[in-house]
Image (cartoon, coloured by chain):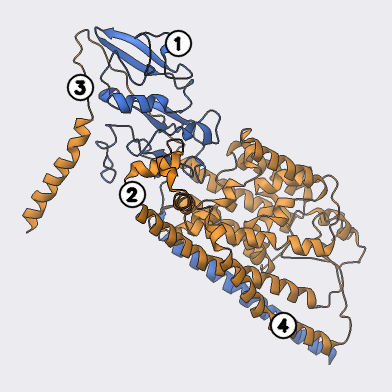
Amino acid sequence: MNDKKEHKQAGRREFIQTGIRWTLGVSLAGVATAAALKVSADDFVWQLDPFKCVYCGRCADYCVMTPSAVKCVHAYDLCGYCDLCGGYLKPDANALSTAAENQLCPTSAIRRKFVEDPYFEYEIDEDLCFGCAKCVEGCTSFGNGSLHLQVRHDLCVNCNECSIARVCPSDAFERVPANNPYKIKGDFSVGTDESNPA
Amino acid sequence: MNRISKIFFSLAAFLLSLPAWAQQRFPKPEFETGYVQPATSQAPPRALFLEYLDVFMLAAVLIVATWFVVKKRSRRGVLWTSVFALLYFGFYRQGCICSIGAIQNVTLALFDPTYVLPFTALLFFVIPLVVTLFYGRTFCAAVCPLGAIQDLVAFRPIELPRWLQKILGVVPYLYLALAVLYAATSSEFLICRYDPFVGIFRFDAEFQMLLLGGLFLLVGIFVARPYCRFFCPYGVLLGWMSTFSKKHMSITPSNCIQCKLCANSCPFGAIEKPVEEQGNRRSNVQRLMTYLFFIPLWIGIGGLAGSMMHVPLAKFNSTVYLAEQLVENPELKQDQEHIDARAFMQSGKSMDQLVTEAKEIRSQFYWGGWLVGGFIGLVIGLTLLKLSSHRNRYDYEPDKTNCLSCGRCMDYCPVKK
């Protein structure tokens, strides 16, 4: 009698267990299917839109990498090759020269090279750059805006949520498909991606 | 009509693109000395097939771990698998992407219509849950790098009092609910932000993050796997799956001789001792019914508390925070030092727009607060219900919800096949 009762109880328990197992399985499948509607086989990486950037300087401070994976890049097509470069020289520079006291960049990461009279080329040493955007502000305010920030994907570890994106005041950070990972000024609108006009 | 609109659009596009040309204040010079312009380098991100290799590794390591736990019954095998997982997912992949964080990607995909979910993230979320539904939490045992690093430092585990375990056991539910709330409102990824070990995996992080990781490892020497047991939000989902799993690791390969060795070997207090029902059955059933009756009350209290918390909860959303600051201190709008206020003024958005947006998000937090609170109320109610119910148990058995399938008890069991 007692044995039978035990047996019956065990059977009931098993039935409940199986029932809940199926419920869990079905709800997991449901969640997965609902999420799968938004799925893309491609991977996504973080990039910043240089036209939205307000050069606040947070890219230098908030990246999980030290130094930041955000670097200044130079879109040479846009550069005016000016002698008086707003991105290279301090606003109150006392001479148009490469002397340290005239340079805007705190780590001297921009190299100024004479091309021909009166033009100068500005090249960025990305090992020294830490993404403070001082030159970007100078170049955009006084020049063509050819110096701008980009996430360097050989350095970026592609965090699930970019810690710079979280604090970016102008929401310039966005996830872009990994096969088209840069938004270099004057370049990415001509690229293959039609959905990303400048 | 169609042609007119086309002309209108192309004209509008032309006019809009004018300022972009006008930006070129100093036209590019035409060089006479044959100067060659250097190319702007574009280093590619990690190759896509490597991302899928990670998924493959996840599945492979899971299969190996499950085989060691369920079939081979080898603690040593589990240990070495976990060391491999720590090296691969931890130090090589630097803790990203992980299944715990993938909760938020999936949540965002469900709530944000513009969000695109990488297939790899979905797989990282689903695969361990499916395996757990069949074989128990073998993912925790040897695949999760966060678990592996804690398991390796659990040198002197002490047994926490039962009541403390139960109270701390509610924290993961709260963490999960909040993480889902913040992900669903597109506020932030809470789990990733406070991942204690990612800094250690990268050998690089903010000081507070490294401090948090170090603290967890230090506590982990005495309280085995503190993050897994008392914080991990993915562990909640795995626990649900594991409770009703088809198979599960068993302590003994044949019959339990009640030697109690396994109970002493488990550092997580996840082994249930044999119990016999105490007291009279009728009053026990009555007590159970009372607790069952109180569950809606718990849900109500929790929901109310959660909804009352919506204002401080919403503060962690940057839009709401900025709106609050600017409404309370309008002079901040002119403050050039306040980067967010300055960027907002530059963006050309009106104050009304910002306030409307913030109010919208706040109301999402109000309803989210009800859900989070109600969920926590339900969890508390069910925990009490479970504490008051007695099921006769004759042998030492793993507590399927909290057992991490690490296999220590199998090693200690003197019964051989």
Q: Where is residue B335, by image quadrant? A: top left
Considering the numbered disc 2 on the image, is that residue within a helix, a strand or a loop? loop
Inter-mark Cα distance, 1 to 3: 28 Å
Q: Which chain is blue?
A: A
Considering the image in quadrants, where does the C terminus of chain B appear? Answer: bottom right
- Hey, what amino acid is under mark 3? Pro
Q: Position of residue B313 (x, y in %)?
A: 56, 58
Local crowd size for mark 3, using a 10 Å CA cut-off: few (<14), some (14–19), many (≥20): some
Q: Is residue B400 left or right of residue B62?
A: right
Residue A100: mark: 1
Q: Where is residue B129, by image quadrant? A: bottom right
Nearest to viewer (mark 2 / mark 4): 2
Considering the numbered disc 1 on the image, is that residue within a helix, a strand or a loop? helix
Nearest to viewer (mark 1 / mark 4): 1
Sequence-first disc among 2 and 3: 3
Considering the image in quadrants, where does the N terminus of chain B appear? Answer: bottom left
